[in-house]
């Protein structure tokens, strides 16, 4: 088996039939003799995802789970049922372009130094999403929150994090790539112990890329590999956490994972720095909104700061992960 596609789902039933039908057509028409399988782990969906897949796509290797393990643990569990030389981690809301599977296998074969590789993500409007990124620093957090990164997207200083200053059509070795559409050698994934399961969702691929590079592997961006990414489809089904204004991230989960990441890789000082920057920025914005009698905005900033304090407590200042499911 050349490729095992790992799909971790949570309340993704509306997306499944179209995605799996397209993948099956691609796999069935495979040329050059490559073979692939799909391993789908359902994270305790309440919308009948597992039942739909079992009924309409019995060819899929279905791994049903009774609880939501999150992205990291879900992929680790799915990988144990995989037999391909390579893994393709694929979000249920990411649709590879025709030919991307074969291209990915060929490129991985040609680059044995690659510990992880990904392609270009575009949203449903055809706009590029950040698909090749740099490791976050506290300075980047300031530039992003202040709006300087968005205002000066071509600046290597202000927009360093998302590499918007780089040519998106050029192959590159990068720090990390989003886990929505990435290829990895299965042997390397196993060697690294998979994802760190303390990250329930968000930052798990950043952490893995750091560990891969520390072990001598490269993280590569190949824009000829393309996928359409809807983004946030599963996040919007979670009613217990506030979704970000952009509609794609669960704020409390993002905060917890950020604190875990900074504490793991930058120590207590890093976690404290992140907390101070984000809390201070939103507190100042809340005070300004209150002075301008912008009640809704002031309340929003107060809620953000409340969530930050709760995330700090939940993770014990970034040192431990709360019990699953989040």
Image: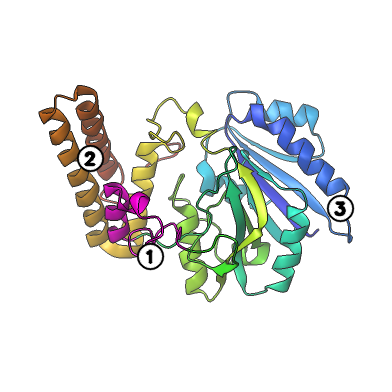
Front one among 225 and 115: 225
Badge 3: how crowded within 10 Å, few (<14), some, or many (20+)? some
Front one among 314 and 87: 87
Q: What residue is pinned by disc 2?
A: 309
Quarter of the image that includes the N terminus: bottom right
Badge 2: how crowded within 10 Å, few (<14), some, or many (20+)? some
Q: In this rendering, would 296 be left or right of 12?
A: left
Q: CA distance from mark 2 to mark 3?
A: 51 Å
Q: Position of residue 152 (x, y in %)?
A: 35, 55
Label 1 close to label 2 by CB (< 8 Å): no
Q: What residue is pinned by disc 3?
A: 30
SS class of the residue under badge 3?
loop
Range of magenta residues:
137-165
Q: Position of residue 212 (x, y in %)?
A: 52, 68
Q: Residue at x 22, y 56 (%)?
A: 273
Indicate the quadrant where residue 295 lies: top left
- Can residue 310 be seen here? The reply is yes
Quarter of the image that includes the C terminus: top left
Residue 94 highlighted magenta (yes or no): no
The residue furthest left is 291
Q: Position of residue 224 (x, y in %)?
A: 67, 59
Viewer-nearest of discs 2 and 3 = 3
Badge 1: how crowded within 10 Å, few (<14), some, or many (20+)? some
Q: What residue is pinned by disc 1?
A: 156
Q: CA distance from mark 3 to mark 1?
A: 41 Å
SS class of the residue under badge 1?
loop
């Amino acid at each position: 088996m050349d490729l095992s596609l790992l799909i971790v789902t949570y309340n993704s039933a509306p997306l499944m039939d179209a995605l799996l039908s397209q993948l099956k057509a691609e796999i069935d028409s495979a040329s050059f003799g490559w073979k692939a399988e799909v391993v789908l782990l359902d994270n305790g969906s309440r919308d009948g995802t597992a039942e739909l897949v079992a009924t309409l796509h019995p060819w899929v290797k279905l791994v049903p789970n009774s609880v939501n393990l999150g992205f990291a643990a879900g992929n680790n569990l799915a990988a144990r049922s995989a037999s391909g030389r390579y893994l393709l981690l694929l979000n249920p809301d990411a649709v590879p372009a025709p030919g991307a599977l074969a291209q990915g296998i060929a490129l991985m074969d040609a680059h044995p130094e690659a510990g992880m590789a990904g392609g270009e993500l575009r949203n449903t409007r055809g706009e590029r999403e950040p698909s090749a990124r740099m490791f976050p620093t506290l300075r980047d957090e300031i530039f992003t929150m202040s709006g300087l990164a968005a205002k000066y997207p071509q600046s290597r200083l202000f927009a360093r994090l998302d590499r918007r200053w780089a040519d998106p059509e050029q192959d590159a070795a990068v720090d990390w790539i989003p886990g929505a559409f990435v290829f990895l050698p299965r042997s390397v994934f196993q060697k690294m112990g998979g994802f760190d399961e303390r990250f329930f969702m968000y930052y798990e691929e950043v952490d893995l890329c750091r560990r891969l590079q520390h072990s001598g592997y490269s993280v590569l961006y190949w824009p000829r590999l393309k996928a359409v990414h809807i983004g946030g489809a599963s996040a919007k089904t979670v009613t217990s956490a506030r979704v970000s204004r952009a509609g794609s991230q669960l704020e409390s989960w993002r905060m917890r994972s950020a604190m875990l990441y900074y504490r793991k890789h930058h120590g207590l000082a890093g976690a404290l720095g992140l907390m101070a920057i984000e809390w201070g920025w939103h507190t100042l914005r809340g005070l300004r909104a209150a002075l301008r009698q912008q009640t809704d905005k002031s309340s929003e900033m107060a809620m953000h700061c409340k969530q930050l304090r709760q995330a700090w407590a939940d993770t014990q200042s970034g040192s431990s992960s709360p019990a699953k499911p989040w």
